[in-house]
């Protein structure tokens, strides 16, 4: 084996493929073709004169040599990133990677993101929708948008809005003049959010209107807010949701708020990142666009 180092690109592709145990997933993460990943791995194997992966139709596994090599490559790239941050503060100033929850991404952020991209075409925005908390020490995420209770250990957080839980239904299933009539509302099909915090609030709602919750049979049960809201818009019943997630539907009339009911949501919207990330130009540009738009959008909900 030669003493000089193999191409850095091939080491990077190896690390990503090894961590994901998949050339296909590595290609998606790296924004290249699967063939490009395979080519770089073959280049590295040729350089080392050893096989690093055992390939099959079902899975990709590291060989013993690959398992030995991986932690050293991971440590090397971690050191590269640390060094680049020390010198430049941001290893990828033209790429903004944001982790954000699925529901907020689909229902609020994506319809508006084109505005930001038109303002800042020099930035490539990459979204990573996930309901899991991101580990900023692993991966390339620059900023996270979370719906939570705060207290993100070791990170800076900026609370944006307090949310509310409200009842909604489509005007296709309830007339405007009936939206505050509990006898009509509770006769509608119930689209149940099975999330524990939401379920507790729904029990409180039923007690307020002397409704036997055990006498209600849900027509649809899910914990995915996107699915719940889509079914409500389609006229399949009423549901209890975060007001922020139905902002556009309330304003365009595709959903109506029911019973003038609102309850403080246990979760609020936050921007979260390591403190130094908020000093990066690309994060500042996004924050300066995002925060006023969030406030404008959610402040307008007070009328609904």
Image (cartoon, helix red, strand yellow):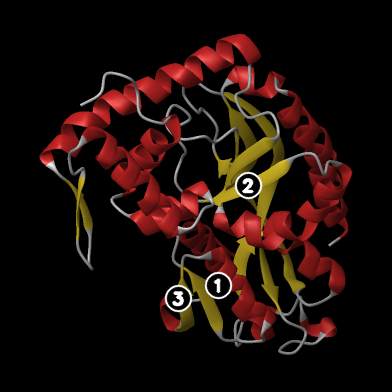
Quick one: which residue is furthest to the front in this view? 2
User: Residue 294 shows which numbered tag?
Assistant: none
Q: Which residue is mark 2?
A: 126
Query: Could you give the CA–CA distance between mark 3 and mark 1, rounded to whole angstroms?
Result: 10 Å
Of residues 232 and 173, the one drawn nearer to the viewer in this rendering: 232
**Where residue 227 appears, x then y in whole percent?**
55, 72
Residue for point 28% across, 35% down? 47
Residue for point 32% across, 27% down? 73
Q: Secondary structure at mark 2?
A: strand
Query: Could you give the CA–CA distance between mark 2 and mark 3, rounded to whole angstroms?
Result: 32 Å
Residue for point 60% across, 67% down? 240
Query: Could you give the CA–CA distance between mark 1 and mark 2, rounded to whole angstroms?
Result: 24 Å
Q: Secondary structure at mark 1?
A: helix
Q: Is residue 15 left or right of residue 164?
A: left
**Where residue 242 appears, x then y in whole percent?**
64, 58
Q: Is residue 185 above or below residue 301?
A: below
**Where residue 114 appears, x then y in whole percent?**
80, 55
Of residues 185 and 105, the one drawn nearer to the viewer in this rendering: 105
Q: Quadrant of the N terminus?
A: top left
Quick one: which residue is furthest to the top in this view? 87
Q: Is residue 86 left or right of residue 178?
A: left
Q: Is residue 188 left or right of residue 192?
A: right
Residue for point 49% across, 64% down? 203
Q: Which residue is mark 3?
A: 221
Q: Which residue is mark 1?
A: 227
Of residues 211 and 97, the one drawn nearer to the viewer in this rendering: 97
Q: Earlier in the sequence, mark 2 or mark 3?
A: 2
């Amino acid at each position: 084996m030669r003493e000089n180092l193999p191409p850095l690109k091939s080491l990077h592709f190896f690390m990503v493929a090894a961590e994901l145990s998949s050339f296909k997933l590595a290609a998606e993460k790296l924004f290249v073709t699967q063939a490009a990943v395979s080519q770089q791995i073959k280049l590295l194997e040729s350089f080392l004169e050893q096989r690093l992966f055992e390939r099959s139709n079902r899975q990709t596994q590291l060989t013993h040599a690959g398992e030995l090599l991986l932690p050293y490559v991971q440590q090397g790239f971690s050191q590269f990133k640390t060094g680049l941050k020390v010198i430049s503060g941001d290893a990828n100033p033209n790429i903004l990677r944001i982790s954000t929850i699925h529901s907020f991404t689909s229902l609020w952020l994506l319809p508006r993101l084109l505005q930001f991209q038109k303002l800042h075409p020099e930035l490539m925005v990459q979204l990573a929708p996930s309901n899991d908390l991101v580990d900023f020490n692993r991966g390339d995420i620059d900023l996270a948008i979370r719906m939570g209770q705060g207290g993100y250990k070791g990170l800076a957080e900026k609370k944006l809005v307090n949310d509310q839980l409200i009842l909604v239904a489509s005007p296709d299933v309830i007339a405007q003049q009936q939206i505050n009539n509990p006898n009509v509302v509770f006769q509608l099909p119930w689209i149940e959010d099975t999330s524990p915090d939401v379920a507790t609030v729904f029990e409180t709602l039923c007690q307020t209107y002397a409704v036997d919750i055990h006498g209600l049979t849900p027509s649809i049960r899910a914990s995915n807010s996107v699915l719940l809201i889509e079914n409500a818009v389609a006229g399949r019943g009423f549901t209890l949701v975060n007001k922020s997630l139905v902002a556009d539907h309330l304003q365009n009339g595709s959903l109506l708020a029911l019973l003038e009911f609102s309850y403080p949501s246990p979760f609020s919207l936050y921007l979260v990142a390591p403190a130094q990330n908020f000093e990066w130009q690309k994060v500042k540009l996004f924050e300066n666009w995002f925060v006023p738009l969030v406030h404008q959008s959610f402040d307008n909900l007070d009328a609904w």
